[in-house]
Image (cartoon, rainbow, N blue to C red):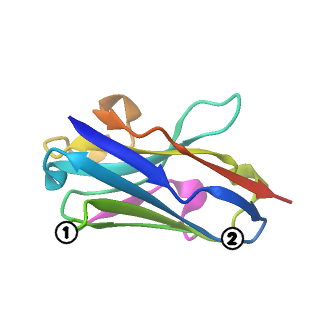
Amino acid sequence: QVHLVESGGGLVQAGGSLRLSCTASGRTFTNYHMGWFRQAPGKEREFVAAITWSGGATYYADSMKGQITISRDNAKNMVYLQMSSLKPEDTAVYYCGALRRDFTVQELGDMTKYDYWGQGTQVAVSS
C-alpha cells in the first residue's frame, strides 16, 4: 500500500504560480513512477505530468508544456509540480498517482494503470 497526500493548492490570480507537493508513505517510493493528473468540474481526469522512478525522465501534457515542471526527491519521498503562468482554465483538483515501475513510459499518461491516488488538492485560478 502507498499512501499519497497532496498539498499546496489554493486560490491564485491568473499569471500566478503554485507549487504542488505530494508526500508518499508506505512501500518503497522508488518502486513507482509518479504522475500528476487533474480534474476540472464536469470533465474527466486528465494527464498533466509524470516522472520516472529515478527522476531520469519527465513527460508533460502538450497543453501545459513550458508552464509546468515535475520533479521528485526520492530521499524525502516527495514529488512536486511547479506551475507558472496559470490561467483560469487550469482550475481543477490536482491528483498525484503512483504507477509501478515495471510499467513502461508509454503508460505514464494512462490513469487506469495507476495503483494509488491521493485525495487531491484544489487549484483555483481567478481571472
Mark 1 vs mark 2: which is more N-terminal? 1
For the N terminus, the quadrant is top left
C-alpha span from label 1 to label 2: 29 Å
Task: Tell me which residue sits at (58%, 59%) in the image.
Answer: 64
Task: Classify residue 14 by image quadrant.
Answer: bottom right
Q: Which mark is residue 85?
A: 2
| Few, some or many residues within 10 Å of mark 2 (<14, 14–19, 20+) | some
Task: Tell me which residue sits at (66%, 57%) in the image.
Answer: 10
- Residue 38, percent from left and from top: 55, 43
Image: magenta residue range: 57-66
| Few, some or many residues within 10 Å of mark 1 (<14, 14–19, 20+) | few
Determine the residue located farthest toward the right in the rendered image. Answer: 127
Q: Secondary structure at mark 1?
A: loop
- Residue 16, percent from left and from top: 71, 71
* Front residue of this view, candidates 108 and 88: 88
Q: Amino acid at mark 2?
A: Ser
Task: Tell me which residue sits at (66%, 38%) in the image.
Answer: 40
Of badges 1 and 2, the one in the foreground is 1
- Residue 15, percent from left and from top: 75, 71
Q: Amino acid at mark 1?
A: Ala
Q: Is residue 78 magenta?
A: no
In the rendered image, which residue does mark 1 sit on?
75
For the C terminus, the quadrant is bottom right
Q: Is residue 64 magenta?
A: yes
Q: Secondary structure at mark 2?
A: loop
- Residue 75, percent from left and from top: 19, 68
Task: Tell me which residue sits at (37%, 49%) in the image.
Answer: 35
Using residue 103 as the reference point, say whether residue 50 is left or right of it. Answer: right
